[in-house]
Image (cartoon, rainbow, N blue to C red):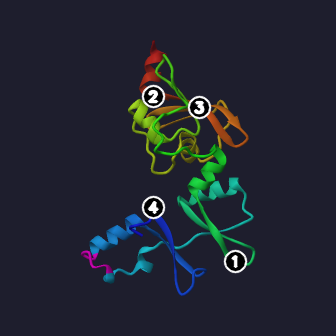
Amino acid sequence: MIASPYTRMPIWRDEPDNIIGILHAKDLLRAVERAGGEVDRIDVGAVAVPPWFVPDTTSVDDQLKAFLKRKVHLALVVDEYGEVQGIVTLEDILEEIVGEIADEQDIVVQGVRPLPDGSVNVDGTVPIRDLNRVMDWRLPDAEATTIAGLVIHEARLIPEPGQAFTFHGFRFQVLRKTRNRITAMRITPVDRQRATTKG
């Protein structure tokens, strides 16, 4: 798992279709620390969390609601016979809704347009890390990769144009939406908004 680029991996017993849990890299590292670095003492099955199975007929909207309700990041997709067909992640669902997530290593940040009043117009697919880097903000990126994904995660719904939400010290207003994809929004630091209102 150390060599893997993924933080969560399914574990199985006897055969690949017999998945018994989902192992998170952080949980494994904590277990290694508790075991004093003696890997042979670790019961991987005890460290893993129970697997979550979803039918392959589940709609994207229902999958998103289920992911947010359960607060998980990975599910196993099964067919009508209960056979595992693959893996779906929260990021997969968010990409389906907000569009393809841009590469975190992109140097040029497109879709970020600061305004004179201190607010910023942002495309929904802009990665949170890129926006933080450009604006010197500290928006969390543990639960979502893009700005649109963050809004959906925090609001726990797919918002409509005109709706606004305040969290993490910012006001997020949805400007445009194409089908289920948030394509544009305006972000305003709460302190800046209060100052503008008073002025």
Residue lying at 66% horizontally and 47% vertically, measured from the top left: 97
Q: Which mark is residue 182?
A: none
Of badges 3 and 2, nearer the viewer stands 3
Residue 163 horizontal/vertical position (percent): 63, 33
In contact (CB < 8 Å): disc 1 and disc 3? no
Q: Which mark is residue 189?
A: 2
The residue that label 1 is drawn on is 82
In contact (CB < 8 Å): disc 3 and disc 4? no
Residue lying at 63% horizontally and 54% vertically, measured from the top left: 64
The residue that label 4 is drawn on is 5
Q: Which mark is residue 185?
A: 3
Please say if 66 is above or below 137: below
Amino acid of disc 4: Pro
- Which SS type dominates the magenta stretch? loop
Please say if 154 is above or below 108: below
- First reached walking from the N terminus: tag 3 or tag 4: 4
Q: The residue tagged with tag 1: helix, strand or loop?
A: loop
Disc 3/disc 4 C-alpha distance (Å): 31 Å
Tell me the quarter of the picture where residue 83 sits: bottom right
Disc 1/disc 3 C-alpha distance (Å): 41 Å
Of badges 1 and 4, nearer the viewer stands 4
